[in-house]
Amino acid sequence: MIKNIIKLGWKNVWRNPTRSGVVIIAVLLGTWAGVFLSAFFTGMVQGYLEDQFHLTVPHIELSHPEFEDLYNPEYYIPQAENVLTNLEEKPYTTDLSTQSLASGLAQSARNSYGVTIRGIIPDSTHSVENYLINGSMPAEQYRNPVIIGSDLADRLGLALKSRMVLNFQDTNGNITGGAFQVVGIFDSFSSVFDEGNVFVNRKGLNNLMGLDQQVHSIHLTLSDFSEADTHASQLQKEFPDLNITTWGEAAPELKYTYEMTDLMMYIVMIIIIIALVFSIINTMLMAVLERTRELGMLRAVGMNKSRVFSMVLYETIFLTMVGTPAGLVLSWLTISYYNSTGIDLGAFAEGMNAYGLSTVIYPSLPPIYYLNITLLIAVAALLSAIYPAWKTLQLNPVEAIRKMN
């Protein structure tokens, strides 16, 4: 008998193709919109995290415990070469980089501005190279070369081959500095970073500060950034005299964003599903009211309440389950396409760069989420079917038969 009820429910779906088609299209578009928006936000967050890790916040940073307080150059990492050798042997290490750091003042004939001066090894690969728009990275053949961000260049009125002065503190606590020539200009995803950071040769910076080959910071890139806390705890035991900071500690807003990604995705999907539920309830309720006499007659000839309830329940589920797979396939195709080409939001570049967001978004969604979203929609279909099906139980067979006369 259940099989017959299911067949009857399926046939009833197509008795009014127009009405059923509208519901199916609504479910299809709602599913597509929800999944695609979830993928868009996920891609935006992932891109934001990757950009920050790539340029501004390392997975794990090692430094002298007192260096971060005052940026005093005398607080360098002791025996940094031994530390680097140890880190290179770790199975989770994918990349290592070192920097000498100084907090100072960048000056030009027009203006001055406080910056962080980053000493890097010349001719080595550095992430900032990916954002160069003019010139080249600092190299050995240049004397006191510097690369600056486009925002700082605008503020100080500098261009390629312009000269600028950098003032900072040396290891004796005296103010020192030198004249530098701009050999490159970069433009990253973050206007704050572009305005507040300059890159110079590490050897030249160390000479001015009174250092030899020492470094102030070691950046460790992990194979899985989510394991940073675990690895940092182990490293702290191995290097108790160093300050070991994870990306979550250095940038709590990044950790919060990462932890909220899943929640934001499901909130978006649930909002759209709620709208779908009301749309389905409205359509099915109208269908039940239009078929009052028919449903009453079925009750009168012997179909019990549970079977009538099940029939309407199956109709609603069929409507939803026809539109859902089509919506999932459409969303998968759309996400796959834009995951390769990206969505260019260059028109909003100024506002997005102010928050450190890239102007090109690559939507992405792990496969498990498709299953979770399908289950959410299935639950929504059941919930939306309950009220219309319950209304059929309120029908009085005698009154239905009278209406037929």
Image: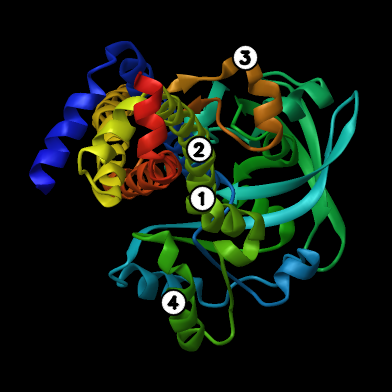
What is the CA distance from the residue labelled 1 to the residue labelled 3? Answer: 25 Å
What is the CA distance from the residue labelled 4 to the residue labelled 3? Answer: 41 Å
Q: Residues within 10 Å of mark 4 (few under 14, many from 20)?
A: few
Q: Amino acid at mark 2?
A: Phe
Residue visible at 68% across and 40% down?
A: 193
From the viewer's perspective, is residue 365 above or below residue 363?
below
What is the CA distance from the residue labelled 2 to the residue labelled 3? Answer: 18 Å
The residue singled out by tag 1 in the image is 261
What is the CA distance from the residue labelled 1 to the residue labelled 4? Answer: 21 Å
For the question of whether residue 324 can be seen, the reply is no
Q: Is residue 149 left or right of residue 334?
A: right
Q: Earlier in the sequence, mark 4 or mark 3?
A: 4
Question: Which label is found at residue 41?
Answer: 2
Q: Position of residue 20 (x, y in %)?
A: 32, 20
Question: Which label is found at residue 230?
Answer: 4
From the viewer's perspective, is residue 30 above or below residue 381?
above
Question: Which label is found at residue 273?
Answer: none
Discs 1, 4 touching: Cβ within 8 Å: no
Q: Position of residue 171 (x, y in %)?
A: 77, 67
Secondary structure category for the residue under label 3 = helix
Closer to the observer: label 1 or label 3? Answer: 1
Residue visible at 42% across and 36% down?
A: 39
